[in-house]
Image (tube, grey):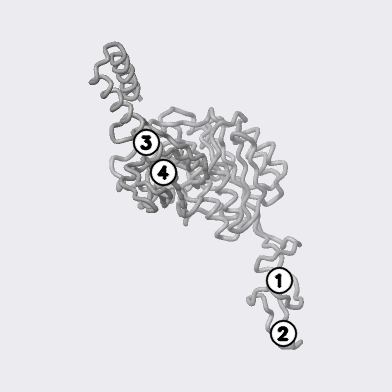
Amino acid sequence: MKRSWIIVLLIVVLAAQALATGHRLYSTLTYLLSAVAIISYFWSWSNVTHLQIVRQTRAHRSQVGSPVEERFLVRNGGVLPKLWVEVRDHSTLPEHHASWVVNSLGARRTRGWTVRTVCRRRGRFTLGPIDLLSSDPFGLFEHRKHLGQTSSIVVYPLIVDLPAFTLPTGELPGGGAMRRRTHYVTTNVSGVRDYFPGDSFNRIHWPSTARTGRLIVKEFELDPTADVWLFVDMQGAAQVDRLWEEPAQTSELHPLMPTRPALEPSTEEYAVTIAASLARHFIARNRAVGLVAYAQSREVLASERGERQLSKILETLAVIRATGTVPLAQIIAAEGRGLGRNTSAVIITASDDVRWVDSLRDLRRRGIRGVAIVLDTASFGRPGNTEAVLASLAQNGIRSYRVRAGDALPAALSAASNEVK
């Protein structure tokens, strides 16, 4: 610190004067300032020693619009009181103001505080490290102690309810059941067997149980409903980011979610939010959902059902960024080869390149049904060829939805831009 150099320089000057003149005043001032400097140095040093920091994070998973709560405890394990200690947090979670100043912390005493932050951006963030800073009463010396322990928190993207979103009527696959056993309860009963510990009671077949005198349970096959694959276009060249300002008041509402913060006017964030919302929408209806996204790397999640699959999809969507270089048309053509008949492919894109519509049309010839959700780039601040894309989709009989910046997603995804006849 600048003050410490000044006091050292002053001590040197006074010592030189005392040696040169032999005057007692200079010697006294030299001893006095030296004692002050030594005491101040050790006082500052002692303020950051024998301190223990406990950081308690309630949950390491959150969601945009939901709070993250942390509890901090500072304990003085020494015999000397601490005049003041600044706890400086270096977390990367946006707007997470966890730094604090602890005053007059007595010996063997503990002080705590709670920090509650509303998550506004998706991603994986680091909590910590922490620096402890303190000084002496004169501000001559500053000591710092670095605590390198860190943890991470994943913020899932915003999810909205889409009660009116459906796949086109008449395109829902049907027919024979898939001859594959499953532990899920479906409408397709394939047979019965003896009860084993762990079987759910709602699987018991009571007529067979009454007839045999022992517990008999039903076995099921997969529903004939098809898998749903979400294709999220993360090509960087197709994205649009409009300059965004945080709402002036945290209480400002937004039509997307009346109790959630506004969604950034970025095609990337809209695409991720739509994908996350559709994943929950279909999984809640017991559909098997898969994900395809070419972002920092190729991300492909095989189609599955259940909450575990939803968690995997949200984990992936939380961290992907629109840095991909592969055009959507190539992605549909390449990944579509592995899709079976009666699969539904939902394309979420801001691309105005009509060639991806041709790739989707080719999938339809193989019995793979397509639905397109097109983000209108003009509403995000960049003129595009959205009208031509929508016209091509209508010409090929592919249902499409148009989403503009600021639209309420439940309404935008309830009425298709065109209807399949």
Q: Distance between the residues labelled 1 and 2?
A: 16 Å
Q: Which of marks 1 and 3 is in front?
A: 3
Alpha-carbon neighbours of circle 3 within 10 Å: few (<14), some, or many (≥20)? many
Placement of the N terminus among the 4 image quadrants: top left
Query: Can the viewer see residue 357?
Result: yes
- Give, as a three-letter code, the residue at label 2: Thr
> Left of 180 or right of it: where is 281?
left
Q: Nearer the viewer, mark 4 or mark 1?
A: 4
Residue holding disc 3 = 44
Residue holding disc 4 = 120
Question: Which of marks 3 and 4 precedes in the sequence?
Answer: 3
Residue 293 location in percent, x, y?
60, 39
Residue holding disc 2 = 209
Residue 319 location in percent, x, y?
54, 40
Residue holding disc 1 = 189
- Give, as a three-letter code, the residue at label 3: Ser
Question: Which of marks 4 and 2 precedes in the sequence?
Answer: 4
The reply to whether the C-beta atoms of the residues labelled 1 and 2 are less than 8 Å apart is no
Q: Nearer the viewer, mark 2 or mark 4?
A: 4
Q: Nearer the viewer, mark 1 or mark 2?
A: 2
Question: Which of marks 2 and 1 precedes in the sequence?
Answer: 1
Residue 147 location in percent, x, y?
49, 40
- Give, as a three-letter code, the residue at label 1: Val
Alpha-carbon neighbours of circle 2 within 10 Å: few (<14), some, or many (≥20)? some
Q: Which residue lies furthest to the top in this view?
A: 20
